[in-house]
Amino acid sequence: MRMALVSASVALSAALAIAAVDPAMAQQKVLKIVPHADLRITDPLITTAGISRQHGLMVYEGLFAWDASMAPKPLMVEDYTVSQDKLTYTFKLRAGLKFHDGSPVRSQDVIPSLKRWATNDSMGGNLIKTAASLDVIDDRTFRIVLKEPYSWVEYTLGSSGAIMTGIMREKDALTDPKVAVQDVVGSGPFRFVKSEWQPGNRVVYEKNPDYVPRAEPADGLAGARLVKVDRVEWRVIPDPATAAAALAAGEVDLWDTVPITLLPVLQGNPNVTVEKIQPFKSMAMMRPNHLHPPFNDPRARQALALIVNQADYMHATIGDQRWWRECFSIFICEHRYGSEAGSEPYRKQDLAKAKQLMAEAGYKGEPIVIPLAEDLPIVKSLTLVTAENLKKIGVNVDLQSADWGAVITRAGKKDAPAAGGWHLFHSWLFASTWGNPLVNIGINSPCDQTNWLGWPCDAETQTLRAAFISAPDEPARQAALDRLHRRLMVTFPYIPLGSFDSLFAWRKEVKDVLKANVLVFWNISKS
């Protein structure tokens, strides 16, 4: 392993060499990051890809932000009032907010941004459906009038969930919500340097000199977003050994999501810190395509749940049991809404029953198309375990290799699997995107195919989810949660595969990495 890392380091040094360096740039303080995936989609309001959300948090800001405990705090909002009947929310933007092109952030930008975001995000969609109107009062003041009281307004407006809230310029926000905005112009603490973007290799951000942070201390994604470096460079290194070598050699400063298998190498280096920064574990999951046979039949999805032995997935993906646990919640077990109600029949692998259910669902040996992300070790391991389990029950598995960017792009296609679509894909999820029925886009099950990749359809799930969201107090919410979870253990919008800690590594000269549900790069200093 040591020899491999040395060789990889030498190779990486050559690969990252820059032919000519501008003297002014040489004086800049640059934070060099190995991201967990390659950035393919730069519009964070149209995709659930975690790397696009991370990019979005660099460039765009929302009206509120979640602190480390995932409670909402004002961000772009200076102050707001709520009417006595809890139907009218009046918000005032902070003075001096500017987009990266120098234009002011106005209420006229906020309203179309919220509407565009809500088209793609189920949590935002719930807020818009509850709203009677969204009104511009003046350049810095806007109002949301509700049809009925809704206790999730601030939480929703602070979302860094599946699709983050981000305020765009009015002309960008009026873009078709299914079409990516090409001009990446936000008002956040960093500016995207499009001219230096090299997909598959490098993404560059520079400090926004016009950004005025809040006065409160940083807390998760809330509070002051203080930028303490001049540039942030994401250097895409798909091979884990090469990334580890680069970190050890000081060629990069921070590595986002470290494979557990390399922990002994990293923890043995006195110049490297390895820590978890997220308050909750992540959850591995398998997502079936509900549009096409056989997984349009709930029996086939139940069969998927029965081929699972979570320990197998976690040993293959994570290894050391200190960093993972079994979890049979569709949500996040450590979270207050981590119900496991109704999961009892699926806590033990039953291959014979799974084979029977596949046959009852009409499966007759057709190829099951599963994209395999070669550049994400966690996703690759999860996928390979599923493939082996499916083969054990006589399923004809068609693994199709690609990088993660191509996998997530393909996952958005509704075509038949034989025509470029898919049957199953794998990923892992954070509490910020899946921790409760409101934020969790994976359970959203309308029958109009406007929901998230996989497109489940179940009217009863929708009714039970609405009951949770509208519950008047916490006891009623918990009771509604259990009823919903029992239904999800019948329909299986996705299958949980175990939960684990995401670990991050950085050089000793890197300080003040924030504890938050998403890794962010403000507040970080580099000596």
Image: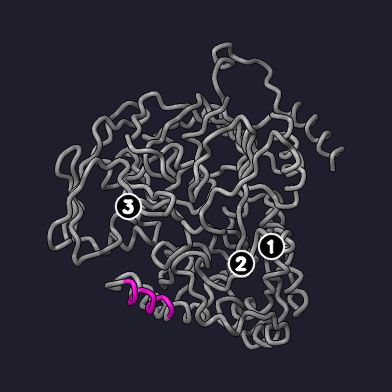
Instruction: Give the class, few, some or many, for how many residues have Cα within 10 Å of label 1's Cα (few <14, many ≥20).
Output: many
Q: Is residue 328 above or below residue 24?
A: below
Which structural element holds mark 3? Answer: helix
Query: In this orientation, which residue lies closer to the viewer: 125 or 264?
Result: 264
Does 475 lie within the magenta span?
Answer: yes
Q: Quadrant of residue 26?
A: top right
Query: In this orientation, which residue lies closer to the viewer: 334 or 210?
Result: 334
Q: Quadrant of residue 289?
A: bottom right
- Which region is colored magenta? 474-482
Q: Find disc 2 in the rendering and name its residue.
A: 286
Instruction: Give the class, few, some or many, for how many residues have Cα within 10 Å of label 3's Cα (few <14, many ≥20).
Output: many
In the rendered structure, find residue 382 and report the number of the disc placed on it: 1
Whether pointer 2 and pointer 1 mark residues with C-beta atoms closer than 8 Å, the reply is yes
Q: Main secondary structure of the magenta part?
A: helix
Q: Position of residue 48 (x, y in %)?
A: 49, 54
Q: Quadrant of the C terminus?
A: top right
| Residue shown at the point (81%, 38%) measured from the top left | 5
Q: Quadrant of residue 298?
A: bottom right
> In the displayed image of the protein, which residue is found farthest to the left?
84
Q: Find disc 3 in the rendering and name its residue.
A: 157
Which structural element holds mark 1? Answer: helix
Q: Position of residue 150 (x, y in %)?
A: 25, 64
Q: Position of residue 251 (x, y in %)?
A: 69, 29
Q: Between disc 3 and disc 2, whose residue precedes?
A: 3
Q: Is residue 330 left or right of residue 272?
A: left
Q: Is residue 442 left or right of residue 95?
A: right
